[in-house]
Image (cartoon, grey):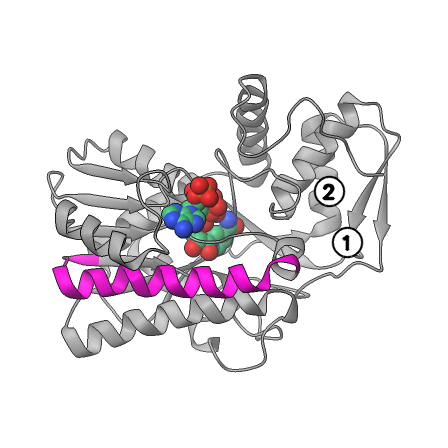
Amino acid sequence: MERSDRVLILGARGLVGSAFHRLLLQENFTNVVACGRRELDITDARAVLDYFRQVKPDYVLMAAGKVGGIHANSAFPWNFAYDNIVMASNVLEAVRQNGAKKVLMLGSTCIYPRLAPQPIQEESLLSGPLEPTNQWYAIAKIAGIKLGQALRRQHGISVIAAMPTNLYGPNDNFQPEYSHVLPALLHRFHAAKEQAVPKVEIWGTGSPRREFLYVDDLAAALLLLFQVYDDEQIINVGTGQDLEIRELVSLVAETVGYQGDVWYDKHRPDGSPRKQTDSTRLFELGWKPQVELREGLRHTYDWYLTALAQRALRGLVQDNFRAEI
Ligand SMILES: NC(=O)c1ccc[n+]([C@@H]2O[C@H](COP(=O)([O-])OP(=O)(O)OC[C@H]3O[C@@H](n4cnc5c(N)ncnc54)[C@H](OP(=O)(O)O)[C@@H]3O)[C@@H](O)[C@H]2O)c1
């Protein structure tokens, strides 16, 4: 991969896309095309073909997608299934027609079977039933991975797929209807602190275990994969270190400085009991995470406070957000 190669980032204003963009700029890549929804609606097949014909990317990071936590998945199953399948197929068909040196698709550890043996290895994909709360998203993501593998086998195009663990960092989605557990907690504890709310409700029992990766660490892994990885086999990107949601809750409350109580609503779904990743394959390529959870949370909260003050958080009605109690 040359620094003058044209690198197209789809989903460039999202959590992953923006982190990868920052990294390429730091690394002096000179021909980066950062594409967000404003520039291209990736569900529009004709527009995607036209865009690829015009831009002619050498490398493509497919970081656009319909992404969200348990609430969003159960509220919008059609969007999670349809949008993600259509976006993956539109991008890969445009690559089939126009060629590219390498395409990196993003899956997620959420797409492994609910009861996959821990830590989860790449071979677990499609080895058992999915977690019902995010099955729509999982099926769509698996379809995207399989389309990429088919494109590689039939047309010889280098399509690779990374499976990141739970991510967090700047430009995350803090909208309560869409956010994942970590940004949801940051936002909720911050609102509760500001409004002196005595008690914050947390969904589920607090006992599931989750792993978290700071998004800049993911960006470094993606760049390494573009540079050295060329295999049909999907590849995990995680720390291998997980913790109970209950422990995460304490860390977030401490980061935000919230001193009230928490209450676990055990009638709400927990999701998978555990999703610890085995990233041995990636570690062997020379990557390892640099940002420890406590430090990453601090950076993310600092970013959140600045974005909130500048009214730059996506989608939030910032003058009127309230903590649920
Ligand atoms: N976040 C995680 O914890 C996590 C973990 C593992 C894997 N991943 C995977 O990483 C990828 C990126 O996730 P992310 O967390 O960066 O999500 P994100 O912050 O929501 O970013 C996704 C981006 O995709 C864009 N997008 C959505 N629909 C689009 C459309 N029709 N046309 C063009 N752009 C569209 C969104 O634009 P708008 O903002 O304008 O809608 C958004 O900027 C996804 O494939 C996700 O499955 C994420």
Toward which corner of the image does residue 158 lie, by quadrant? bottom left
Q: Mark 2 or mark 1, which is nearer the start of the sequence?
A: 1
How far across and down, in percent of the image, does residue 188 sit? Answer: 72, 35
Which residue position holds label 2? Answer: 249
* Amino acid type at image mark 2: Val
- Alpha carbon distance from label 1 to label 2: 8 Å
Q: Which residue is drawn at 58% across and 17% down?
A: 309
Toward which corner of the image does residue 304 lie, by quadrant? top right
Which residue position holds label 1? Answer: 206
For the residue labelled by badge 2, is the local secondary structure a helix, a strand or a loop?
helix
How far across and down, in percent of the image, does residue 129 sit? Answer: 59, 80
How far across and down, in percent of the image, does residue 147 sit? Answer: 31, 72
**Mark 1 surroundings within 10 Å by alpha-carbon count, few (fewer than 14), some (14 through 19), many (20 or more):** some
Q: Which residue lies furthest to the top in this view?
A: 309
Q: Is residue 84 above or below residue 115?
A: above
Magenta range is 75-102
